[in-house]
Amino acid sequence: MAFTAADVKALRERTGCGMMDCKKALTEANGDMEKAVEYLREKGLAAAEKKASRIAAEGLVVSVVEGNVGVVLEVNAETDFVAKNESFVEFVNNVAKTIIKENPADVDALMGLPCVNTSMTVEEALRDRILVIGENMKIRRFVRLEGDLVSYVHGGGKIGVLVKFDTDCAGKDEFAAVGKDVAMQIAFSNPAYLSQNEVPAEVVEKEKEIILAQMENDPKMAGKPDKVKAGIVNGRIGKYFEEACLLNQPFVKEEKVSVEKYVEGKAKEMGGSIQITQFVRLEKGEGLEKREDNFADEVASMIH
């Protein structure tokens, strides 16, 4: 079956592949469009495997809530340009909706599920995006929560936050504003724990050891009585809780009150109760090795 330049153009638009690749695919498939797409997909799988060794530490974090179910999801790619690519953003949102709908146990379980808004599994949809966009991509991690939830995304997908509340104010407009304030606080201050009750005893002991060692190494402090030192340690531990625990942190918009007191005050104004019970904060590329090469080097390596 013969094919025309218009067929090549149509295949290119459908797959996002290069003109020469599309022409070759149609030649191999004897002009059959579906077989040509299949050929490019198969070629894409091989390309995806080759790209798998390339570091993907950029990408996108999304936080999505539908009804009483929400998810924070990180999908990585090689360059920050991809985060602005509509096709990539659509894929990430489809994966988030799949997690909300299917409740997979982990990323491995997610990969075999049917991807929302596509006729593919999540794994097939991922490989399809790798083929079309030409970068290594990886679904890295997600957290799914159920309940009264508020989501927030900062910096165009750099940080995603999901906060769970126990409240009887969920339907009120004022609650949405309070929820967003709390979510923004979490994005900004990156607390390690919800409350000081959640801080492991060994972490507190380690902090005390560090504070005592600092005092021993300070000539002005070393000679002070143990009772005085104990008081200073307790004061500094209180400061540690203020930094590490969300409820103890000074509220960013009104630093004279803690986050806990701010939420209590707003709940009282609404004539109800609001308690923060859980939060998740994912930051793009957190803990991942970054690329050391640059674009110029990569272009040069492709030429040679």
Image (cartoon, helix red, strand yellow):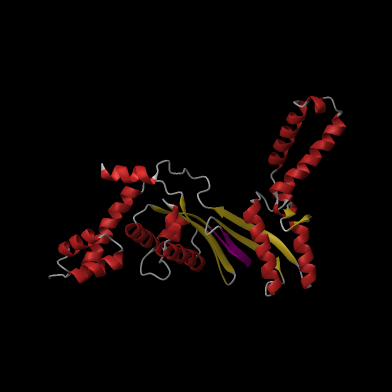
Task: From the viewer's side, name the closer residue of 72 and 25.
Answer: 25
Tell me, yes or no, whether the highlighted magenta stretch contains residue 52: no
x and y percentages locating residue 112 in the rendered image: 40, 61
The location of residue 156, given as percent across then percent down, is 52, 59
**Residue in front for this viewpoint, 155 or 189:** 155
Q: Is residue 152 magenta?
A: yes
Q: Which residue is rendered at x = 24% and y = 68% of the image? A: 9
Quarter of the rendering occupied by the N terminus: bottom left
Residue 20, position as x, y percentages in the image? 21, 59
Marker count (numbered): 0
- State which quadrant residue 44 falls in: bottom left
| Left or right of 283 in this view: 245 | right
Q: Where, by quadrant of the figure, is residue 25 drawn?
A: bottom left
In the picture, which quadrant includes the C terminus? top left
* Residue found at x 48% / y 61%: 104
Q: Which image quadrant for residue 170?
A: bottom right
In the image, the segment drawn in magenta is 143-154
* Residue that sits furthest to the left in the current view: 1
One can see residue 179 in this view: yes
Front one among 136 and 195? 136
The answer to whether residue 109 shows anywhere in this view is no
Q: Main secondary structure of the magenta part?
A: strand
| Relative horizontal placement of residue 182, taking residue 62 as reference (left or right) | right
Residue under the point 38% across and 46% down:
295
x 67%, y 57%: residue: 185
Instruction: Give the x, y percent position of residue 22.
Output: 22, 62
